[in-house]
Image: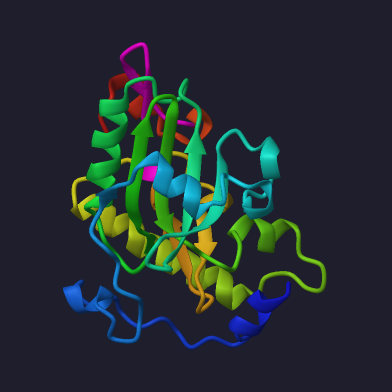
Amino acid sequence: MGCFQSKIPHQLPPPPPPPPQTSSDLDGNGEQQAVPAFNEFSLAELRAASNGFSSDLIVSESGEKAPNVVYRGKLKNNRVVAIKRFSRQSWPDPHQFVNEAAMVGNLRHKRLVNLIGCCAEGDERLLVAEYMPNDTLSKHLFHWEKQPLPWEMRLRVAYHIAQALEHCNAQGLKIYHDLNAYRVLFDEEGDPRLSSFGLMKNSRDGKSYSTNLAYTPPEFLRTGMCF
């Protein structure tokens, strides 16, 4: 599993109780690089950051076959980011896309892959998030070569993702769409984080719905509300 395995010890200490969330969690105190405020990028900026959306920079596990391709990019300030490119059909209304993205982009937590920007120009719909260099939980669960993911890390994943979901719920974002192993990514320290992409829903013909109905709570599909 390459560099991922070297980052994660086989024996992990029991996770500590969650500390209260403060701005110091994200302000460069050694735990995590400061996350910039949410920003709207121009298409030219993101095209330059991804070398013209080069196929060499695709990091989606399904490559170019993925319905929404993710690229590894570098902004002008040298920050490495993940750029997710949607089809216009997924988000026909650019204003709704930007509003959804901004709502999620104002959320910050050390257990999330924080959203830092978006772009809606012409037919292009793009999201920009922190880059996670150590692959997805899906890859380490189902595509391991030498040994399976240790149980200690599986417990850590469950604990950290529960923290992320609890924070989202406390901030008024009670629905997480499409919760699955592809939505959990590992950062440079080998810690699991929940992708903020799943906090966004899209709409077609004016009706909101999840990007993957198979993972959406049935009561939300029926009523549009979460109880």
In the image, 36 versus 4, the foreground residue is: 36
- On the image, the x and y values in percent for residue 198 come to 41, 44
Q: Is residue 174 magenta?
A: no
What is the tally of numbered marks visible in this picture? 0
**As displayed, is residue 16 above or below residue 115?**
below
- On the image, the x and y values in percent for residue 192 come to 49, 67
Residue that sits furthest to the right in the current view = 146
**As displayed, is residue 127 above or below residue 8?**
above
In the image, 197 versus 116, the foreground residue is: 116
In the image, 204 versus 40, the foreground residue is: 40
> Which colour scheme appears in the figure?
rainbow
- On the image, the x and y values in percent for residue 200 come to 35, 38
**As displayed, is residue 151 above or below residue 54?**
below
Choose top left, top right, bottom left or bottom right for residue 143: bottom right
* Chain part drawn in magenta: 198-211
Which residue is depicted at the point 46% across and 31% down?
211
Which residue is depicted at the point 18% across and 73% down?
23
Give the left or right position of residue 153, taking residue 164 as reference. right
Placement of the N terminus among the 4 image quadrants: bottom right
Instruction: Residue 227: tell me if it is visible.
Output: no
In the image, 198 versus 98, the foreground residue is: 98
Which residue is depicted at the point 69% across and 36% down?
65
Placement of the C terminus among the 4 image quadrants: top left
Give the left or right position of residue 71, taking residue 221 as reference. right
